[in-house]
Amino acid sequence: MSLYGRFIPKGPSGFGYSSTAEEVSAGLDLRGKNYLITGSNSGIGRETARVLSVRGATVLMAARSQAKAVEAGRNFAQSVIPLECDLSQPGSVRQCVEQVKQTGRLLDGIIANAGIMALPRWEQRYGCELQFLTNHVGHFILITGLLEQLGDKGRVTLVSSRAHHRTYAEGIQFDNLSGEKGYSPWQAYGQSKLANLLMARSLAKRFANSGRLANAIHPGVIVTNLGRHLPGVGRQLLRWINPLFLKSIPAGAATQTWVTVHPDAAQHQGQYLADCNLGTTSAWGRDELLAERLWVESEKIVSALEQKADA
């Protein structure tokens, strides 16, 4: 527990800043349940996968390569299903969708955990800025492709970030999703995290009265591989302040674990949660019209990608 965390009280859920994934899932029996987690080979993704395995669940561990997923899942309490899912490659994501379908398993939860952050230089792929493509479009393809595999009470959890407050002035730059007209590492990252939050809202709207749930979360600030693109001074600063202010990986995995498996979290639909309690979004994060526009634009992007793949 960080020094800062010792002084933060727990919230209405009974959990808070310093709660860990093991604590928020204590006493739960997840035998017979199936959960898919992207970015499950390291950091909070791996810790979430490990804890769900300890609770008896079968975890479909998605990573950029199957080998990474296999290695990450060694010695877990339960057997895992390793999957390749490179979110920056639409073909890899579609192949992952087909592999999940071939298992014949209904999913009790999908955790869209993987992501990249603050790329120092503008990178584009398939007509999209790389952070937007990886963090949002890749997950959009994966989740919408697996909706038929999602159980009647299945939950979708998208890992957003407090960084969604730092997006561009218009929220989502629909006229510059490629980044060609201007690029800012942190604003582009914030835009992709806002997209995760808005997708959760759109999914929740589509899940209304179905028993399924969709929410977005902020895991907290944690030292993981997500920060590998930060400049050297930034990485050193994070390591220095880590024991004082930042969350541990077990604490960082808590909110997405709680939202995905805890019975009390069933009261939340289309919400943004942090520290296992309701968080505060930006005005853009509450904009239902923006969320719907993003959904429509995302469908257009995916359709165009599929047409290119079939050509």
Image (tube, grey):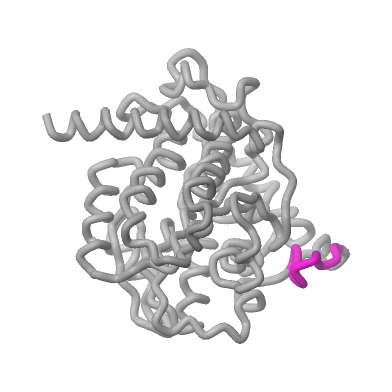
Is 41 covered by the magenta stretch? no
In the displayed structure image, the side of residue 182 where residue 168 appears, left or right: right
Front-lying residue, 6 or 101: 101
Considering depth in this image, is 193 or 120 the residue closer to the camera?
A: 193
In this figure, what is the number of numbered marks?
A: 0
View extreme (front): residue: 209
Residue located at (32% from left, 57% from top): 148
Q: Give the answer, above or below, for where 205 lies relative to 46.
A: above
Which picture quadrant has residue 263? bottom right
- Tell me which segment is drawn in magenta: 8-18
Is residue 16 rendered magenta in the image? yes
In the image, is residue 25 above or below residue 3?
below
On the image, which quarter does residue 152 sit in? bottom left
For image coordinates 68% across by 35% down, the residue present is 165
In the displayed image of the protein, which residue is found farthest to the right? 7
Give above or below for 176 relative to 255.
above
Residue farthest left in this picture: 311
Name the residue: 50% across, 34% down: 119
Position above or below: 148 against 226? below
Residue 194 x, y percent position in the rendering: 58, 37
- Residue, x 85% and y 63% (percent of image)? 8
